[in-house]
Structure formats: C-alpha cells, structure tokens
Image (tube, rainbow, N blue to C red):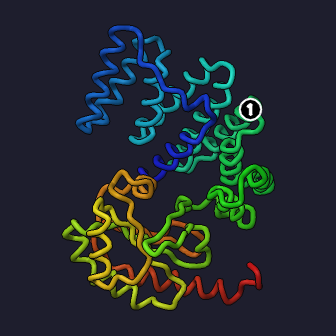
C-alpha cells in the first residue's frame, strides 16, 4: 500500500509550476487552530489524528482550504481513506482557475489512478482517464498527464490508445529521462503498464558507474537496503555474500543501498568485508531511493524480475534463493529466445 502511495506523491510533485506554489493555511481562526493541531499530530506520527484535523479545518473553512486539501490528498491516500482524498481533489478542481485547472484535474486523476491500483477497479481507471483528459484539454502539452493517461488506458486494456499516449510522451522527453525509458518499455510490452512495476531510478554506484533500473532489462535485480550501524543487517551479511557468490555470472544484479550517513565508514566496511557487488549510499530513510520504495525498516530486500516487475519484498533476513533461481531461469529463457538487438 505505502509503495503505491509513494508513487502517487512522486508523480504529483512533478506537476506544472502552478502545482508548486506554496499552499496557504486557512484564514478562519477555528480552521487555523484545527490545521495547526493537525501539523502537531504529524510531528508525533499520529497520522490518523492529523488527517481528521485537516478534514475538520477544511470544513471549517467552507471547503476552501487549499493547504488542508493537499494534506487530505497526501495522508488520505497513505491511509487508504480514499473518500477523503477524492473529496479534497474534487474541491480543488471546483475552485481552480487559469493554469491551476490542468493541475487539479491531474492531481484528482492521480488519486483515482492510485486508488484503482489499490482496489483493482476498472471504474476508477475510467474516472482517472476522464480527469487526465480534462487536464490535457486545459493544458495540451502536459507530459505527466499524458503518461498517466497511458497507464489508465492500459489498465482499461485499451492498448492502442495507451501506446499512442506513451509514444506522445516519449517525443516530449530527453533520451536520458527515466520515465521516457519506462514509456518505451510500455510501448513494446503494453502488459507491463498493468503490472506492479518497480519505480524507475538511476544511481551512481560506489565505483562511479551510473546504473538505471531500466538499463538492467533482462536481468533479475535484488535491491538490498541496509546500513553498517544495523545489527540485523550485519548478521544477514553472510547470507547476502552467499547469494552474490551463488549467482555470479548469471543474469542477476545485486544492488545494496546503504542508509549510512558516514561515507568513509560505509566504504571501509564494504572493503573490509569483501562485498564485491554494486553499492550506492542513500544516506538514510529520507534518501530518494529509500522514500521511493517506502523503506522504514532494514534489512529490507526487493526482488525485481527481468521485466522490471516487483516480485517479492522481505523485511529481515529471509530465504529467497528459491525465488531468485526461478526468476533467473526465466531470464535465461528470455535471453535465449530474444532476437538480436532486442
């Protein structure tokens, strides 16, 4: 659930400039008090309570509190309170003017798309498509709305229409754009747009190599979140070393993502323990890759198949060799049957 919400929030953050404007708090004194109480609840991680305060503040402001509505979308989606998130999105659409019209339809569309991914309901994908269509009517060259509309259409199994949107998106983005690379995969394999794809990312590894997830197409990826200060991670290290040795030379890539703040300590630990696979330092739970995968405990591993589909997620040291063997065997079969240049 949290993984889907992170994808939603990252997508919303990429909206046109009008969406980037800083939200203002409510003007009504009672609403302002409720809003501040919501912010205080967030600081002590009482998200349920915070969401109720933001809803109350928005109601006290007569449904015109933009800051409240943004919080209702964010935390409503995170908690699966979809009616709250939808209400906030609809209020924002109703109040939008000028450039905001496209942005608010897009944001509501993203709420519906993510809700659809959570509930697997075609009705929600249809509504998401309708909102993206309205966003594009207001702002025809809106790349994120085009890409998201392609995803909604793919889930409705309107593959030709989805491919047309992805092709349109590809023309608008530079070659090294990660979403462009993902769109190209959706064009060649529309069924992937309906799968639980791992989010696209790119990192520069410890040895200076730039690695993008979609560049690893055809290989199984084991994403390992850890830290030198984590006792259970150190205990799991021999297991990870065994996996790296077992699958050496096979279509499997191990990428360990460290949450360490101390770069030198991280480098020394890797060298001392002979960890001769790919490494990247994300710097903590608030690092970009950790947030992308909603990591809040370590060790935490994600297994991604040769198509980029998220197949398995484990918190703690777990036996995953059996799953990896099956995925690697499939990757080998795909490589054996692939045409030259694919």
Residue shown at the point (64%, 25%) measured from the top left:
100
Within-10-Å neighbours for mark 1: few <14, some 14–19, many 20+: some
Q: Is residue 328 above or below residue 116?
A: below
Q: Farthest residue in the left direction?
A: 231
Secondary structure of residue under mark 1: loop
Q: Left of 235 or right of it: where is 38?
A: right
How far across and how far down the image is residue 83, in percent?
Answer: 48, 32
**116 or 317: which is nearer to us?**
317
Residue 84 visible in rendering: no
Q: Residue at x 39, y 8 (%)?
A: 28
Q: Residue 220's spot in the image, x, y percent?
A: 52, 77
Residue at coordinates 21% horizontally, 77% vertically from top-left? 235
Horizontal side of residue 294 vs 128, given as left or right: left
Q: x, y (%) of residue 30?
A: 33, 10
Please tell me whether residue 285 is drawn above or below residue 102 in the rendered image. Answer: below
Count of numbered labels shown in the rendering: 1
User: Which quarter of the picture shows residue 133?
Assistant: top right
The residue at the far front in this view is 264
User: Quick check: 54 left or right of 328?
Assistant: left
Relative to the observer, which residue lies in front, 129 or 269?
A: 269
User: Badge 1 is on which residue?
Assistant: 139
Q: Position of residue 333 (x, y in %)?
A: 63, 87
In the picture as drawn, the residue positioned furthest to the top comes out as: 29
Q: Between 309 and 234, which is closer to the camera in this rendering?
A: 234
Q: Is residue 152 above or below residue 319?
A: above
Residue 280 at least partly seen:
yes
Q: Residue at x 39, y 12 (%)?
A: 60
User: On the rendered image, what quadrant is the C terminus found in?
Assistant: bottom right
Q: Is residue 305 left or right of residue 258?
A: right
Residue 329 figure quarter: bottom right
């Amino acid at each position: 659930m949290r993984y889907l919400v992170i994808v939603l929030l990252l997508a919303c953050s990429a909206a046109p400039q009008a969406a980037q404007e800083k939200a203002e708090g409510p003007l009504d004194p009672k609403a302002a008090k409720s809003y501040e109480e919501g912010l205080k609840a967030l600081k002590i991680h009482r998200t349920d309570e915070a969401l109720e305060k933001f809803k109350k503040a928005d109601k006290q402001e007569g449904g015109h509190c933009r800051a409240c509505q943004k919080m209702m979308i964010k935390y409503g989606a995170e908690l699966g309170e979809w009616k709250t998130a939808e209400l906030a999105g609809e209020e924002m659409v109703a109040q939008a003017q000028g450039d905001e019209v496209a942005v608010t339809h897009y944001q509501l569309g993203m709420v519906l798309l993510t809700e659809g991914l959570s509930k697997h309901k075609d009705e929600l994908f249809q509504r998401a498509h309708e909102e993206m269509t309205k966003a594009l009517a207001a702002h025809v060259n809106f790349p994120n709305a085009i890409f998201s509309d392609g995803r909604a259409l793919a889930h409705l199994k309107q593959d030709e229409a989805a491919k047309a949107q992805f092709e349109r998106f590809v023309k608008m983005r530079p070659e090294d754009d990660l979403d462009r690379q993902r769109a190209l995969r959706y064009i060649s394999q529309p069924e992937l747009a309906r799968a639980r794809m791992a989010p696209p990312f790119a990192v520069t590894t410890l040895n200076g190599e730039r690695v993008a997830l979609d560049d690893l197409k055809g290989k199984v990826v084991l994403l390992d979140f850890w830290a030198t200060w984590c006792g259970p991670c150190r205990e799991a290290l021999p297991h990870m070393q065994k996996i790296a040795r077992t699958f050496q030379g096979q279509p499997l890539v191990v990428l360990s993502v460290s949450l360490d703040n101390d770069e030198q300590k991280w480098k020394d630990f890797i060298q001392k323990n002979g960890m001769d696979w790919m490494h990247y330092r994300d710097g903590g739970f608030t690092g970009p890759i950790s947030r992308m995968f909603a990591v809040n405990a370590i060790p935490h591993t994600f297994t991604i198949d040769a198509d980029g589909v998220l197949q398995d997620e484990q918190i703690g040291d777990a036996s995953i060799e059996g799953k990896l063997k099956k995925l690697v065997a499939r990757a080998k079969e795909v490589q054996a049957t692939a045409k030259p240049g694919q």
